[in-house]
Image (cartoon, grey):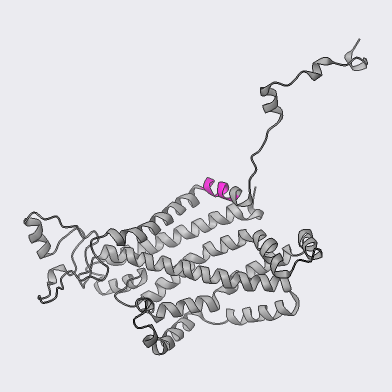
């Protein structure tokens, strides 16, 4: 008789499964998080991964090399107290030496080469490029943090409160959008130079100068509006979700809901916007330094190095090319890395 129509129990169905059968039938997946999944997708993007490696290498080089390099960014090699100025150190070509250094080499001493030569004042150009990269990266990162804090705070308040609060904040945002940022930097730099020059004297901010301080102020006053709009739009859609309603019904306050529910679920927008803000800040700082509104001399930045190279462009074109290539490499790598972050962390772009 066919087993389909019998009442007898099939004992073969109760035989314990083997390990191979268990592995075939039960496919367990390791528990993961949103951030971990995003990192896995990011590492699969070769362009974003290479861009991240380039950013890390440039950042580490700008932090480590000034501590071990034998030359200083402000040390004029041909100037010594009580001795006449040795002009042979000025405008040395890459991997060349001054007259005094040639004599030391002839005497058997080891002299570290000038990889990028020296500038018109006899300062090692390589360490000035490295130090200028550090200044430009620091300005970019700190300006992005300022934009992140202000934009995230105002955007979350505007999106969660809505109503009159949202209306007032958005009108303020519209007004700020109409202000010319470059003109504001120039005006603030002129005003702060007169009012804060004496106050900064003798402090750590004296080397940075009032121009960079005015740039930070402008970033804090003007550049947060795009970030706040993105976060506001994200929170407007998230605050209608059931878990937010349940949190309200449980008696949670608005600030707690924003910190625990809304901002963590907006993390993709926050990460992407911050990553794309850094190259914008670096390019703005380099552009202002090129115009002479950057850091105070002798402290270099990539923009000021490019500006100084204009005087000897026909004789020493590499001095213009080197900082321009570094700026382009940093901005391009950050933009490509930001695109990779967007592809990895934006839920709308998942396949």
> Which image quadrant is residue 301 in?
bottom left
Q: Residue at x 46, y 81 (%)?
A: 185
User: Viewed as shown, does residue 179 lie left or right of 204?
Assistant: right
> Which image quadrant is residue 64 in?
bottom left
- In magenta segment, residue 93: no
- For this rendering, which residue is in front, 3 or 109? 109
Quadrant of the image for the N terminus?
top right
Q: Is residue 279 above or below residue 110?
A: below
Q: Residue at x 10, y 64 (%)?
A: 100
Looking at the image, can residue 318 be seen? no
Q: Is residue 80 above or below residue 51?
A: below
Percent across and percent down for residue 108 are 8, 54
Name the residue furthest front: 251
User: Viewed as shown, does residue 182 lie left or right of 326?
Assistant: right
User: Viewed as shown, does residue 62 lie left or right of 77?
Assistant: right
Name the residue furthest top: 1
User: Viewed as shown, does residue 241 lie left or right of 270?
Assistant: right
Percent across and percent down for residue 232 are 67, 69
Find the magenta span and give its range: 38-45
- For this rendering, which residue is in front, 317 or 133? 133
Percent across and percent down for residue 4 are 90, 17
């Amino acid at each position: 008789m066919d087993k389909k129509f019998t009442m007898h129990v099939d004992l073969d169905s109760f035989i314990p499964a083997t390990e191979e059968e268990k592995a075939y039938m039960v496919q367990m997946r390791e528990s993961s998080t949103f951030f971990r999944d995003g990192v896995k997708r990011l590492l699969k993007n070769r362009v974003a991964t290479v861009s991240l490696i380039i950013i890390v290498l440039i950042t580490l080089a700008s932090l480590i090399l000034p501590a071990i390099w034998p030359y200083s960014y402000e040390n004029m090699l041909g100037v010594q107290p009580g001795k006449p100025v040795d002009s042979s150190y000025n405008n040395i070509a890459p991997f060349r030496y001054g007259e005094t250094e040639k004599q030391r080499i002839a005497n058997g001493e080891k002299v570290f080469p000038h990889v990028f030569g020296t500038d018109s004042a006899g300062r090692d150009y390589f360490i000035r490029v490295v130090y200028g990269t550090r200044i430009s990266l620091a300005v970019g990162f700190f300006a992005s943090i300022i934009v992140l804090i202000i934009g995230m705070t105002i955007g979350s308040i505007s999106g969660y409160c809505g109503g009159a609060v949202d209306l007032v904040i958005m009108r303020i945002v519209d007004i700020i959008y109409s202000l010319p940022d470059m003109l504001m930097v120039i005006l603030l730099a002129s005003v702060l130079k007169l009012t804060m020059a004496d106050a900064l004297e003798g402090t750590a901010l004296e080397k940075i100068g009032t121009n960079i301080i005015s740039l930070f102020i402008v970033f804090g006053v003007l550049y947060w509006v795009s970030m706040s709009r993105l976060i506001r739009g994200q929170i407007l859609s998230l605050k209608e979700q059931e878990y937010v309603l349940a949190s309200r019904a449980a008696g949670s306050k608005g600030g707690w809901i924003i910190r625990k529910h809304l901002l963590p679920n907006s993390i993709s927008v926050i990460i992407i916007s911050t990553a794309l803000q850094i190259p914008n800040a670096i390019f703005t700082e380099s552009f202002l330094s090129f115009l002479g509104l950057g850091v105070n001399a002798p402290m270099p930045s990539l923009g000021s190095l490019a500006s100084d190279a204009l005087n000897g462009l026909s004789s020493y074109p590499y001095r213009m090319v080197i900082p321009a290539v570094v700026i382009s490499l940093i901005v391009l790598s950050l933009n490509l890395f930001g695109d990779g972050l967007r592809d990895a962390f934006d839920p709308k772009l998942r396949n």
